[in-house]
Image (cartoon, helix red, strand yellow):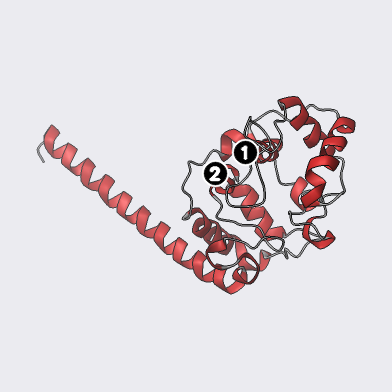
Amino acid sequence: MGRIRPLSRLLLTAAFSFSYSAASNAADDNLTSEGETLYKQNCVFCHQPDAIGKAGFAPSLTNPEFLSIASDKLLMSTIRDGRAGTAMAPYAHLGRNGIKSIVTYLRSHATLPDRSAAVDMQRDAQGDPRKGELWFNNICATCHGVKGDGYLAGGSGTAIGKQGFLSKASDGFIRETIKHGRSNTRMLPFQGPSALANLSEQEINDIISYMRTLN
């Protein structure tokens, strides 16, 4: 058999790459479709169609800022384990593949780059929880409750003081949420001249350090 000429080799490589890409896209489409079906069977009742959420009842899972900083690990473990002390029940019975398909479906709504890996690699907060408690009570408790109990305590924000959240969310995830908020939700940004409050990096670290003492 003669040697394959360079041009032929390039054509074969291009054909293989195209076939692999097409197969990968088809697999993603199938996973997204399966995830949409499972979402409508299990999640739509609280999180609403297209996972846009409902203020004071369930958070948006397709919010651009949320999807940009939430890792697959955070999403999958939350679906699997639920969040004790809230209305979020565990869905471990869906199995890893079922849960992954739901996450793939949620990801299909993303409009911003996925920054979750870099966000989770941020330094842990080195703050003063005593000062953080003051900021938390003055700013965060209004929506999330005095102890971060969220909706079930009558708040309009999520339960950020529960172990189900604190054991899964990185300090970077919490930090970025405080800084930039989430568009079209009640979670406003708290850093910058146009923010509701222009908190410093240290003040945000103080809040996170206090949150880690809750529950």
Residue at the spot of label 1: 180
Measured as percent of width and height from the top left, residue 63 is found at: 56, 52
Q: Which mark is residue 163?
A: none
In the rendered image, the residue lying farthest to the bottom is: 41
- Numbered label attached to residue 68: 2
Question: Where 119 sits versus 54, above or below?
Answer: above
Q: Residue at x 70, y 31 (%)?
A: 198
Residue 125 makes an appearance in the image: no
Q: Amino acid at mark 2?
A: Ser
Does the rendering let one see residue 123? yes
Q: Given this view, does label 1 or label 2 mark the residue nearer the observer?
A: 1
In whole angstroms, how far apart are the C-alphas of marks 1 and 2?
12 Å
In this rendering, position of residue 85 left or right of residue 2: right
Q: Residue at x 72, y 47 (%)?
A: 168
Q: Which one is nearer the viewer's eye here, 4 or 31?
A: 31
Q: Position of residue 192 (x, y in %)?
A: 63, 30
Indicate whether 191 appears above or below 95: above
Label 2: state its secondary structure. Answer: helix
Q: Residue furthest right?
A: 130
* Residue 20 x/y as whole percent: 31, 50
For the residues labelled 1 and 2, say whether their Cβ atoms are less than 8 Å apart. no
In this rendering, would 99 be left or right of 57? left
Sort mark 1 into few (<14), some (14-19) or many (20+) by Cα contacts within 10 Å.
some
Q: Quadrant of residue 207?
A: top right
Residue at 58% in and 33% down: 118
Please identify the quadrant where the N terminus is shown.
Answer: top left
* Viewer-side residue, 1 vs 202: 202
Q: SS for tag 1?
A: helix
* Horizontal side of residue 81 vs 61, given as left or right: right
Residue 25, above or below 193: below
From the viewer's side, name the closer residue of 1 and 106: 106
